[in-house]
Amino acid sequence: MDLKEITNEYEKKEITKFLNNKPLVNAVKRVLLAAVYRGKLEPGVEPDPTKNFMLGFLYTEDLGVEFAIDDKRLGEKTRAVLEAIKMVQVGFGQLEKMKEEEKPKEAEEVSGR
């Protein structure tokens, strides 16, 4: 889905402002990933959803390792988490693309065209 089709001009400008605030972008990304991700998420650090999420499936609350989950279920959970992470990453990628498309527009407006 093209985000330009579902946002008005005001929303596009607000999205650009949001994307220019990298700490806020990272915080929002961490919040969204926290719902699906069991890896390493740290305050003030850009989230890298490709690190350590698999280990969260195997560790118990006391950090002991328990392999009570069978391989089939582990595969299903892994696929579901990867799909959710992909959706977040694709969404932020679409936002960045939208931001890049706004830059030429702004340049035109400044030059008076």
Image: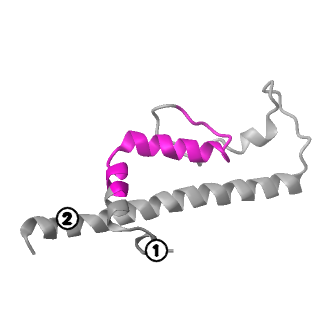
The x and y percentages for residue 32 are 58, 47
Disc 2 is placed on an element classified as helix
Which residue is pictured at 91% across the width and 50% down the height?
A: 70
Q: Bounds of the magenta span?
A: 14-42
Which residue is pictured at 36% across the width and 51% down the height?
A: 19
Location of residue 102 (image quadrant): bottom left
- 44 left or right of 52 in image: left
Q: Kindly identify which residue carries mark 1.
A: 2
Which residue is pictured at 39% across the width and 60% down the height?
A: 96
The 10 Å Cα crowd at callout 2, few under 14, some 14 to 19, many 20 or more, is: few
Disc 1 is placed on an element classified as loop
Q: Kindly identify which residue carries mark 2.
A: 106
State yes or no: residue 100 in magenta.
no
Give above or below for 34 relative to 99: above
Which residue is pictured at 46% across the width and 43% down the height?
A: 26
Give the numbered dot on residue 32.
none
Q: CA distance from mark 1 to mark 2?
A: 20 Å
Give the mark, 1 or 2, whose residue is nearer the N terminus. Answer: 1
Identify the amino acid type marked 1.
Answer: Asp
The x and y percentages for residue 71 are 87, 53
Who is closer to the viewer here, 27 or 7? Answer: 7
- 109 left or right of 94 in image: left
Location of residue 54 (image quadrant): top right
- 16 left or right of 113 in image: right
